[in-house]
Image: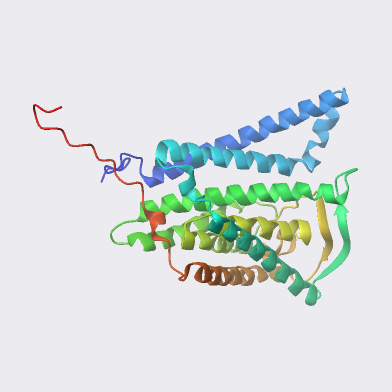
Amino acid sequence: MEPFFDGGTGRLRAAWRLLLQYLTYKILVPLLANLLVVAWLLAVTREAGFSGAPVVRSLPDSPLLPLIGGVAGLVGVVLSVWLAGRFLDRRPFVEFGFHLSGGWWLDLLFGMALGALLMTVVFLLQLGLGWITVTSSFESSLPGAPFWLAVLLPAAVFLCVGFYEELLSRGYQLRNAAEGLNLPSVGPRGAVLLAWALSSAFFGYLHVSNPNATLLSTANVALAGLMLGFGYVLTGELAIPIGVHVTWNFFQGAVFGFPVSGLRIGGATFLSLDQGGPDLWTGGAFGPEGGLIGPGAMAAGILLTALWVRLRRGEVAVHAPIAEGPKPTRRPPHPPEGRQ
């Protein structure tokens, strides 16, 4: 077997495509983030008309940093996936989960409702058990900004993160892994399921360096990857995963005031909490994704996604075309001699 190229399509094999796309993403995102920070510093110092030293010293605590990171991540992932699709995969961008239609947008709305519902249940359960106390509401942490303006900051951050993490982990990584694993002994459906598990495990690994991460939180984030990827596995589209991801994070951090994967985005929260209860169950400083309540919500998310797909499509089945590559290009036959 040729280790680098697929003889049928002439493309690099899936493992090399995954590696090159990921390296491109890892180079682009910090580069874009640094460029955005420099542009922001130049704009602030020019407007204020003073030395940038005080601004630079306050930069690590700025609530705008998560937004800069979110925008850099969004642009970096979209650009790296587009480049990989154009030059490595040889497939249009829409094939990574964006066959937009009325049904696609309906699935997106379902995903958004599901993410909000699941996190609301997590909040109400902890509230009912007496593990959290609501200390205040409608708080803005942006100096001089009213709540309804400040809340746009975490909304924008979570929108960026939900979009680019799903495009990267499910749209590109899961799809290419499934294609590479689509061997005669595995079959397309088995390849999709195996890629679903592997990409979810890698998704958990990507969060291992988050603040306050533990072995349990890493395992739970991998389980969250299974929940988020389930809609893609059943439909081949990113509508449900993006919807769930955006509102799961937004309700977790900006509505109920929990940490989100160990991070606090800032800007504004509808509720501010005093977290108590056993960290093993609540997740403590990592947030609900780090405790034993999280997997229950994720299992419910998988079940409700299956019910929705059954209602919309009439069946719950693995979308096998995820594991298929583009059709091999065939050269036209040579005309017989003497004919042009």
Q: What residue appears at the point 58 percent right and 71 percent down from the top-left corner?
A: 304
The correct choice, above or below, for 262 with respect to 16 in the image is below
- Toward the viewer: 53 or 181? 181
Q: What residue appears at the point 82 percent right and 47 percent down from the top-left corner?
A: 150
- Specify the color scheme: rainbow
Q: Quadrant of the C terminus?
A: top left
Query: How many marks overall?
Result: 0
Q: Could you say where residue 224 lies in the image, as x and y percent from the top left?
A: 59, 62
Any part of residue 257 in sight:
no
Q: What residue appears at the point 46 percent right and 48 percent down from the top-left corner?
A: 95
Left or right: 247 as drawn, with respect to 84: right
Q: Could you say where residue 280 lies in the image, as x and y percent from the top left?
A: 69, 69
Residue sticking out furthest to the bottom? 129
Any part of residue 162 in sight:
yes
- Toward the viewer: 57 or 88? 88
Q: Could you say where residue 121 lies in the image, as x and y percent from the top left?
A: 71, 71
Q: Could you say where residue 50 lies in the image, as x and y percent from the top left?
A: 87, 23
Residue sticking out furthest to the right? 144
